[in-house]
Image (spheres, grey):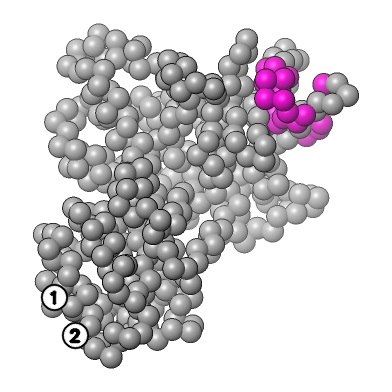
Amino acid sequence: MKEVFKKLIVDSQERSYTNLIPRVYTIPTDTNKIVSLIGIRRSGKTYMLYKLIEDLRKNTPKENIIYINFEDDRLFPITLQDMDSLVEAYYELYPDKREEKVYFFLDEVQNIDGWELFVRRIYDTLNIALFITGSSSKLLSSEIATSLRGRTIVYEIFPFSFGEYLNYKEIDVNIYSSSSQSYIQNAFNSYLVDGGFAETFEQSEDVQKRILKDYLDLIVYKDIIERYAIKNHALLKHLIKYLFSNMSTLISFTKLYNEYKSLGYKLSKDTLYEYISYLQEAYTLFTIPIYRNSVKEEQRNPKKIYAIDNGFKKLFDTSLSPDYSKLYENIAFLHLRRKTSEVYYYKGKQEVDLYANIDGGMLINVSYDISSEATLKRELAALEEGMEYFNLKKSYLVTKERDEIIRLDDEKEVVVVPMWKWLVS
C-alpha cells in the first residue's frame, strides 16, 4: 500500500490545478482547524479542494501539498490499518519535510471505516493542515460531532446556486438594467428546470437526464444500498420516485406506509423512516418540520419534503410541462437552506410555505401565479397571520413576475418579488 500512496502523492503534485470554476464559498487555508467539506456527490467538493491547492501553490512548495482520493480503485481494499502507510510514504519521499507544515487533502475519506481515528491522531501529533470531504451528513451529526469535536470547521457544499450559475455564464447582475434582466431571466428559466450540477450545464436535455440518472444511481447503490445492506431495492426505488415527484409537499409517513402496504410491499414504518433518513444522509433530500416551540409537537405533524436539486425532478416527471409551483418552492427552500439548517413551515389557521431563522426571522410564501385576486388574497392572509405569530414587520411573497410592496397596515408590509430577483438580491 505504501508504494501505491507514493505514486498517488507524486501524481497529485505533478497535476495542474487551473481554470477552475469559482464558487461563492470562502474556505480558509490558514486555519488551525480541520476543514471539512460535506455534501451530495458531484456537488463540487473535489473541485473546491483543487481550488484550495491552486491557491496554496502560489506561496507553498507543491511538495508540501498532498491530495488523495479514497475512491481511487488503486487503493481498494483499504482499511484503517493501511492509513499509516500514507504518512510513511510521504516522509519517505520527502524526509526533509518533517519540520515543515504539510497540507493533506483527503477526498471522500468516509470510505474508510474508523477514518476519524486516523485524522484525529495525525492532526494532534503532526505539523499538518487537514482538509477532508465526505458525501454523508453523518459526518456532521455523528462522526465529526463526536470524534473531531473542537478540531474542525464544517462547510456544507451544495450544487451551484443561481448566483453561481450566473457567474459561470458570465452574466452581470444589474437588476436596474433591462438588458441584464433579460439575460438573468433567460438563465433562470434554464436553471429552474435543469438544476445546478455543473457537469450538466452545457449538455442537451437527453444527456442532462443521463448524467443525473448516473448521479442518482451512484448515490443509491454506493451510499445507501451498499452502506446499509438494503435488500428491498424495489421499495427504495419506488420511494425515491415518489419523493422526487412530490417535492415541496407535505408528507405523512402513516399515509405513505398504508399506501405501500396496499400496493403489496412488505415493510414496517421503521423501514420507511430508515430509507428516508438514508436519503437525507446522502444529501439527496431534506425534510423540514412545522415550526413549534415543542419538539414533540414538531414530530406529531407531517413534514415537508424538498430535493437537493431541481434537475432530479425531471427524471420522474410524467407530465409534458414542468410543475413550476413545486420547482419554485424547492428552489426557494434551497436558497434558504444554504444559509441555515433552521428552516420550517408555519401553520396556524393557514399555512406559510417557509420560515427561516435568518436575520431575526424570514417568512416566505411562494406562489408561481398570483394573477387571480383570490390567490393573492389567500397568500397575503397567510403571511399576515405568520407575521403576527413571529412578530415580524416584513415578509415575502415570491412569484413569477409581480414586483411591488403591499402594505398590510402602518407597520407590516409584504415584499412581492419575482423569484429570479429574490435569488440575486
**Residue positioned 46% across, 23% down in the render:** 295
Q: How many marks?
A: 2
Disc 2 element? helix
Return the residue at label 1: 2
Q: Is residue 208 left or right of residue 231?
A: right
Q: Nearer the viewer, residue 382 or 358?
A: 358
**Residue positioned 61% across, 52% down in the render:** 163
Part of the protein shown in magenta: 382-408
Q: Is residue 322 left or right of residue 38?
A: right
Q: Amino acid at mark 1?
A: Lys
Residues at marks 2 and 1 touching, judged by CB atoms closer than 8 Å: yes
Q: Quadrant of residue 133?
A: bottom left
Q: Nearer the viewer, mark 2 or mark 1?
A: 2
Does the segment drawn in magenta span residue 388? yes
Q: Position of residue 329 (x, y in %)?
A: 56, 31
Q: Nearer the viewer, residue 189 or 42?
A: 42
How would you rate the neighbour count of disc 1 (Cα within 10 Å): few for under 14, some for 14-19, many for 20 or more?
some
Q: Position of residue 65 (x, y in %)?
A: 35, 78
Label located before the other in sequence (2 or 1) = 1
Return the residue at label 2: 92
Q: Is residue 155 above or below residue 18?
A: above
Does the segment drawn in magenta span residue 346? no
